[in-house]
Image: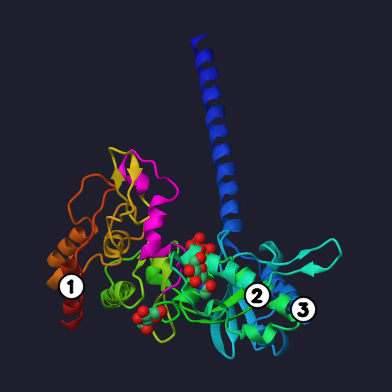
Amino acid sequence: MRRIRFMRRSCGRRKVIYYIILIAVAALIAFAMYTYRENSCDDRESRNIITSLCQLYSQGKVAGNLCEDMCTASILTYKKCTNYRGGKHILISDWKGKTVILKTKEAYIDKYFPIGYEGIDGETNIPSIVEFTDMINTSMTSVLGLNMLKQDIIGRLWQMKFDDFIGDKDKLHSAMTSIWSLAQQDEYIMMQYFQNSSHIPEIYGTCGHIYAMEYAPPGDLLDPRLLNNFLDGSQWKLRAKIALDILQLLGAMNNELSHPLHLCDIKGENFGFTETGLIKAIDVDMAFPDPKMKTEMLNPHTKCSKHSDCDWFDCKGWCNIEQSKCTDKRINNNLQAVCEKIFSTRYENVFNGLLQSPPESVAVQLNTAIKKCANPTGETSPGLRFEAPQETFNEIKDLLLKSLSS
Ligand SMILES: Nc1ncnc2c1ncn2[C@@H]1O[C@H](COP(=O)(O)OP(=O)(O)OP(=O)(O)O)[C@@H](O)[C@H]1O
Ligand SMILES: *[C@@H]1O[C@H](CO)[C@@H](O)[C@H](O)[C@H]1NC(C)=O
Ligand SMILES: *[C@@H]1O[C@H](CO)[C@@H](O)[C@H](O)[C@H]1NC(C)=O
């Protein structure tokens, strides 16, 4: 009797284990398929994006300084796509023997808000030049948070001469359609506006809704792929040089622009290097000019009960606890975020920090400096972080230089 019960029980248990394994395997397969689909890009769709744009170009419906090269001369040609994670469409291309990136938020131009609409008479109505300039002004002002003073606002956004399109309604429509689709892409506005920065990728131009950008990939050290690059103690000189470049970029973001830029999404893969080794900020979706930062900090969640309610990703906010309202103040800075998210080794960092295992000559000092930089006031609350001071910047820089000279 007891034996039978025992047998039955063991049989049931085996069944349960069997089902658990079955479910686990099914989940794993589903997860793998999902990850693969999310991370793979479609070569055919990428080609199709260009083909359909060029079709519109041949019908005179879009314009841009690169349309000729892309569609007629075929000296701007698609090579391969990158893994876009449901984000922007990014096509690695060749332009006169040089690698460039073609980018667009939406694959097809009709996914953007149209500029013209059809009237009851079947005619397409387009805005007047004044109305159009106003629309572009509004987009740029809202993305940049800066007052666009009396300046050539369309010239700032588009590399062709807009005036050349005035006079012929179809031509004007094609220009407006193209500019308006670009004006709906925050990254394009940011990068085009800050073209005079030495650390923003060059924008070579546009065709329709697509823009061509300087190629600056992050590389294996800043964007480790699974299994290929668990940073170990090696390659110190290279890692130290990359860290020095990042520091230089941070300095420039504070000093060389009309307004300091707040980088609120700090991770290695958002920085890249040009062919000549210059570091660039390749993802500026979460970069805000100082005046914009203030409105951004207040914007979506003005109500708060703790400081982290006021965070904007890596830009740490401050809650006025008595009034339960966020303030417009960012309490940390770019340096603190870089030290915490890129330089230091934390348990969240699967791939370890960029500056782990420094050479012995600087190890103790550097590790201390980075730790202080990542959490300058030694806060125990995990989300609360304050500004890392300029001295820390200098100290880390000097130690890195020292480690390279020995
Ligand atoms: N100028 C560039 N040069 C080289 N590679 C680039 C460039 N711009 C983007 N990439 C590659 O494409 C990836 C995605 O680009 P980006 O971050 O701009 O798009 P995204 O849609 O915002 O993606 P995510 O949501 O992952 O941040 C980057 O991580 C980088 O690997
Ligand atoms: C853009 O709009 C702002 C405010 O609405 C205005 O002060 C500025 O002059 C406009 N700029 C241009 C170039 O029209
Ligand atoms: C870029 O232009 C702005 C004005 O628009 C100016 O204040 C700034 O100094 C310029 N920066 C560089 C690096 O030329």
Give the alpha-carbon distance from disc 3 to disc 1, as whole Å: 57 Å
Outermost residue toward the right?
Answer: 121
For disc 3, the marked residue is: 170
Determine the residue positioned at 41% across, 64% down. Answer: 288
User: Distance from label 3 to label 2 (Cα)?
Assistant: 14 Å
The quadrant where ligand 3 appears is: bottom left
Q: Is residue 26 found left or right of 291 in the rendered image?
A: right
Q: Is residue 62 left or right of residue 388?
A: right
Of tags 2 and 1, which is closer to the observer?
2
Depth order, front residue of 254/323: 323
Name the residue type under label 2: Ile
The magenta segment is 281-310
The mark closer to the camera, 3 or 2, is 2
- Measuring from the top left, give residue 238's x and y in whole percent: 30, 77
- Which residue, given by chain and number where applicable, does mark 1 sit on? 394
Of the image marks 2 and 1, the number of the one nearer the N terminus: 2
In-image side of 150 versus 291 (left or right): right
According to the picture, the residue beneath numbered tag 2 turns out to be 129
Q: How is the image coloured?
A: rainbow
